[in-house]
Image: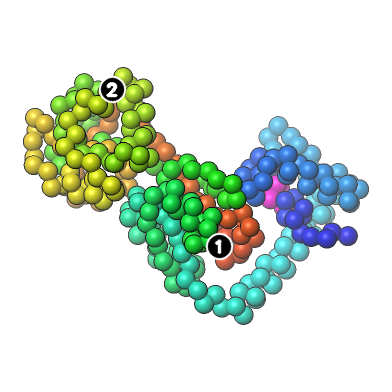
Amino acid sequence: MLKDFTKLETFLVVVKEKSFSKASAKLGISQPAVTQQIKHLEEMLDAKLIERKKNGVRLTKEGEEVYKIALRLSKCLQNAEQDLLKIINKEITFIIGASFTIGNYVLPEIIKDIRETCNNDILIRVDLSETVVDSVLEKKYDLGLIESPIFKEGLIYREWMEDELVLFSNTKLPKYIRTEDLYRFNWICREEGSHTRKMVAEAFEKLGVSCKKFNVISEVSSSTAVVNAVLKSPIDKEHPTVSIISRYAIENEVQAGRLFESKIKGEKIKRKFYICYLKERKHDPYLLKIVELLLRLKK
């Protein structure tokens, strides 16, 4: 007799993802732990359920039968959880913590869809990625959306959107900027310690560019402040005011013709956005419904 549904759930995820490693990431446990749970399940049933192949996994005849039964059990559990949610009625506010770029520029585009899925009030708190992660761990936020890879024990992380940091100005720039041209610009920079500034510094270091030689006219503490500072700077074709920021942060201004984007020759600065939530809530159907929605809404 199965004393819990954990091993069957792991089995279902392995079959769905067609991979032990992908199941590991989705469940928030190590790959050896996934393998061990499948092994225990097979020993308990005295039958081989899954065969590993080069291109994924294949169910044995016994595995196909167990899969059908596990699906029925999973459906019954989901229906029971939904009925419980109706009784509880979730008279609470769902709190999402988001880093600055995500909170100010990405979430506004999709918040309506989240509200409809959540069917409840949503509160968005915008802060540094590290603060968001800590607040999820302290159970102050239900979900975290971050732009810095700050990984801590006790949380599940899911890769979400891909972002690119781009050079921009309120003065029209060439399509490609040479590294030597970077020294003639006036710079608006993020504050010391910000993840964006660190990424930019690392990218320039690879190109042999010294940020210390830049003419930095201002340091600011948020993406919004960067955009506004560049927008309000004097138009100067000889010495344009520039900065580097997420493409999402300037998308609307570029489309409106108020800001201009350019590429640095020989370098693309890309990063991932992440969803994070407590491991202990990995079976929470309310939270997982929102996570799955966000994964579907990738830009």
- State whether residue 136 appears in this view: yes
Looking at the image, residue 148 lies above or below residue 277: above
For marks 2 and 1, give the CA distance. 44 Å
> Magenta stretch: residue 138 in it?
no
Q: Nearer the viewer, residue 110 or 235?
A: 235
Mark closer to the chain start, 2 or 1 = 2
Query: Magenta stretch: residue 14 in it?
Result: yes
Residue 75 on image: x %, y % = 70, 65
Q: Residues within 10 Å of mark 2 (few under 14, many from 20)?
A: some
Q: Main secondary structure of the magenta part?
A: helix
> Residue 60's spot in the image, x, y percent?
82, 44
Query: Residue at the location (61% across, 54% down)?
Result: 279
**In the image, residue 47 above or below residue 5:** above
Q: Which residues are magenta?
A: 12-16
**In this view, 294 is above or below 208:** below
Is residue 129 toward the left or the right of residue 242 in the image?
Answer: right
In the displayed structure, 180 sits above or below 228; it is above
Q: Residue at x 48, y 56 (%)?
A: 135
Q: Secondary structure at mark 1?
A: helix
Seen at 83% across and 54% down, the residue is 65
SS label for mark 2: loop
Between 133 and 21, which is closer to the camera in this rendering? 133
Q: In the displayed image of the protein, which residue is found farthest to the bottom? A: 87
Q: Which residue is mark 2?
A: 209
Circle 1: residue type: Leu
Task: Say which residue label 1 marks.
Answer: 287
User: Could you say where residue 258 lies in the image, as x and y percent from the top left?
Assistant: 16, 47
The part of the image, by quadrant, that contains residue 137 is bottom right
Residue type, mark 2 in image:
Val
